[in-house]
Image (cartoon, rainbow, N blue to C red):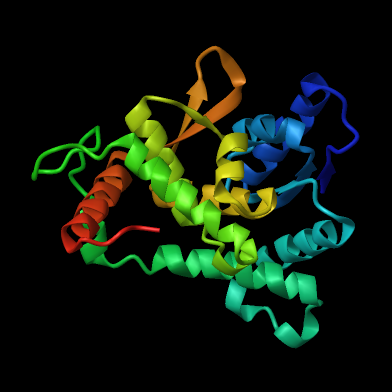
């Protein structure tokens, strides 16, 4: 467990992060890092390995649970964790990580084929490109639900991040990890788990900032952009609105 909450400045954090990445990449151990929001982009840039669990401003219970989960995952699979032996928050984290993994692994061969052959840009064979204001309007409509219902009822971080990255792609903008976590509309630690999993699956692509090696950007893969464009066009033909 690496605790960065009390670390002042990037220079002090870099050696710890580089060590964590090395340990995870070498298979020596799984590492848990708890960091403040101010260091979120640095942590994401320096510890991309899937075996590094990134927490952001996590409470004591969540840190302890993450350590226990990382320890268990180093010895067994998600579904091997016995629920009756796990405290409530550990069970929640186990189910969360397991659900993400199950969703990503459930992509069928047909879906993989549908993602293949994408081209840069958001244009379909049927004409006009998807416009950024349309995607931004969908995002605003999704956030508007929070005015009438509790936000966690509709939590769908993968979809929210896909939409945000789609709009940024069309606008020619780059999205940092910290910004994408905000767009996910869930706790930053949950968003980080999704970003890692979706990147590992190939739907998201990490790209380093050429001017600042301590920051990394996330963007849609061409395949993901193609699939999302096709979906939006299909819904448009049905004459209904996407929310």
* Screen quadrant of the C terminus: bottom left
User: Which residue reaches farthest bottom?
Assistant: 84
Is there any visible trace of residue 77 in the rendered image? no
Q: On the rendered structure, is 91 left or right of 171? A: right
Rendered residue at 24%/38% (across/down): 122
* Residue 2: x %, y % from top left: 82, 43
Rendered residue at 37%/25% (across/down): 172
Q: On the rendered structure, is 113 left or right of 7? A: left
Q: Nearer the viewer, residue 175 or 198?
A: 175
Residue 200, compared with residue 111, is above or below; it is above
User: Which residue reaches farthest left?
Assistant: 126
* Residue 103: x %, y % from top left: 44, 67
Name which quarter of the figure residue 119 lies in.
top left
Is there any visible trace of residue 129 in the rendered image? yes
Q: Nearer the viewer, residue 99 or 165?
A: 165
* Residue 121: x %, y % from top left: 24, 33
User: Which residue reaches farthest top?
Assistant: 211
Name which quarter of the figure residue 80 lies in.
bottom right
Residue 63, compared with residue 110, is above or below; it is above
* Residue 194: x %, y % from top left: 55, 53
Q: Nearer the viewer, residue 38 or 25?
A: 38
């Amino acid at each position: 467990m690496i605790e960065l909450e009390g670390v002042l400045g990037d220079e002090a954090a870099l050696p710890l992060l580089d060590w964590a990445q090395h340990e995870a990449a070498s298979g020596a151990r799984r590492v848990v890092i708890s960091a403040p929001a101010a260091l979120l982009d640095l942590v994401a840039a320096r510890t991309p390995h899937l075996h590094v669990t990134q927490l952001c401003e996590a409470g004591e219970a969540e840190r302890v649970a993450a350590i226990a989960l990382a320890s268990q995952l180093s010895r067994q699979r998600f579904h091997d964790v016995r629920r009756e032996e796990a405290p409530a928050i550990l069970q929640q984290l186990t189910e969360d990580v397991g659900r993400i993994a199950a969703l990503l692994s459930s992509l069928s061969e047909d879906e993989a084929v549908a993602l293949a052959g994408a081209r840069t840009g958001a244009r379909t064979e049927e004409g006009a490109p998807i416009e950024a204001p349309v995607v931004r309007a969908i995002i605003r409509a999704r956030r508007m639900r929070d005015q009438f219902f509790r936000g966690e009822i509709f939590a769908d971080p993968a979809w929210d991040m896909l939409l945000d990255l789609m709009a940024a792609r069309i606008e020619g903008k780059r999205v940092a990890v910290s910004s994408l976590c905000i767009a996910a509309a869930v706790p930053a630690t949950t968003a980080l788990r999704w970003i890692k999993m979706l990147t590992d699956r190939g739907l998201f692509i990490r790209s380093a900032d050429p001017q600042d090696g301590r920051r990394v950007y996330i963007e849609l893969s061409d395949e993901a952009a193609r699939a999302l464009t096709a979906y939006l066009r299909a819904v448009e033909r049905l004459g209904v609105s996407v929310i």
